[in-house]
Image (spheres, rainbow, N blue to C red):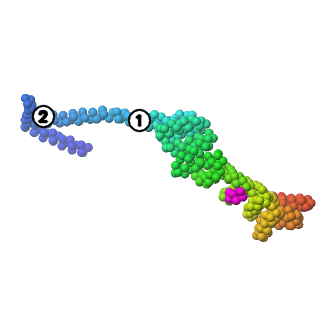
Amino acid sequence: MARFSLYLVCGLVLGAVLVNAISQDPGYLLVTWGDWQVETSVWLALSALMLSLVLLWLVLRALRTTLRVPRALRRWLGLRSARGAQRRADKGFAAFFEGHWDVAEKALKKGGSPYEQTILHPLYAALAALRRGESARALTLLEQTEKDGSAPASLITLVRVECHLKAGATDEAARSLEQLSASDRKTPRAKALRAEAAYLQRDWQPLTELLADVRRAGVVPEEQMQVWEREGWMGLLSKADDAASTAVSVWKRAPDVLKAPGQPLWPALLDVLRQDAQADALQAQADALQKVLQERLQQHCEPVSLDAVTGLPAKQLLKMKNALERWRDEDSEGRCHAVLARIARLEGDAKAEAALWAEAHARHPSASHAAGWADCLRHHGKEAEASALEAEALAALR
């Protein structure tokens, strides 16, 4: 308020001085141009000049505003279009995740304005068609996207591979994967698709090589990973046929989880190694079987392993017996004794068989040892002792 008052006083004083100067001497100005003459006072000429400048400024401002209207209109229309596109995109993505594939495809497929698109829209439109089970439609959308150049080629290829796999066209999927660059093939999604293609093609070697990377990437559910892992290593083992060294190599490279008791890989290995193990021309097969059995029995004593021991040829059975005799004193769980008891039955040594089962059960009381001991007693006509032993073992387990 004080500043306004100061400006007002200064303006009044300046006005008074100018009025006084004009009244005392208005001045004289003569402008001639050929036959044209203008006579006026200096102060009037200055006032006319200032008014002309103000009018010129107003005209220029009006022209500038007029020229800005189309640009502002275009900006407003573009903003309105972008907002509409965003609403359609939100609707499309929401429909995609809700499972309304037809709505998602219509909302996300390419529009007519650059404002309306991101690289994801046409890809998700293709995925929506794929989820609806229309692989051919999805591939058509991908071809249009590729022609328009509205998405990176690597992303288009990944979606195309998924379309081929869903349609069961594994060869086309493999060829599409080969089109990826070296760096693109290392992405988690690319590795997962390569693993799926190898699984569907029963190409076990590349599948098993990819499994560790795919699991680390976490892009495939663990349940699916377990299926791929189990069938991949089982398939690789089955391809070993009667090549003992190959089968054992596969077994050693397999993950530990597949080597645990109850898993099918160990019985499958035994089946491969037992093929023609009795033939004289394939003694290497029998030697390999005897060796892996020794290693296995140091860790686990399973019925399938005991059955395999009893099926060894005489030469390998003797080697097994000698090795077990060396280990038996260090065996605190009775595994060696259980195997030696089986061998004793084969040799017809009833007394040694019973003593070995008794020692195995004493070192590590278990249902399997009790069952083996009871079977031994029954085999030699001691039914009452076998029943008493089973009842005692059952009571102990309770």
> x, y (%) of residue 163?
58, 40
User: Which of the pair 26/182 is nearer the observer?
Assistant: 182
Name the residue at 21% across, 34% down: 56
* Disc 2, SS: helix
Q: For residue 279, what is the image quadrant?
A: bottom right
Q: Describe residue 61's horizontal placement relative to residue 143 as left or right.
A: left
> x, y (%) of residue 44?
12, 34
Quick one: which residue is furthest to the top in this view? 35
The residue to which callout 1 is attached is: 78
Q: Does residue 307 show up magenta in the picture?
A: no
Mark closer to the observer (1, 2): 1
The numbered dot on residue 44 is 2
Q: Which residues make up the magenta segment?
A: 243-251
| Mark found first going from the N terminus, 1 or 2 | 2
Q: For residue 249, what is the image quadrant?
A: bottom right
Residue 114 visible, this angle: yes
User: Which of the pair 273/349 is nearer the observer?
Assistant: 273
> x, y (%) of residue 3?
24, 45
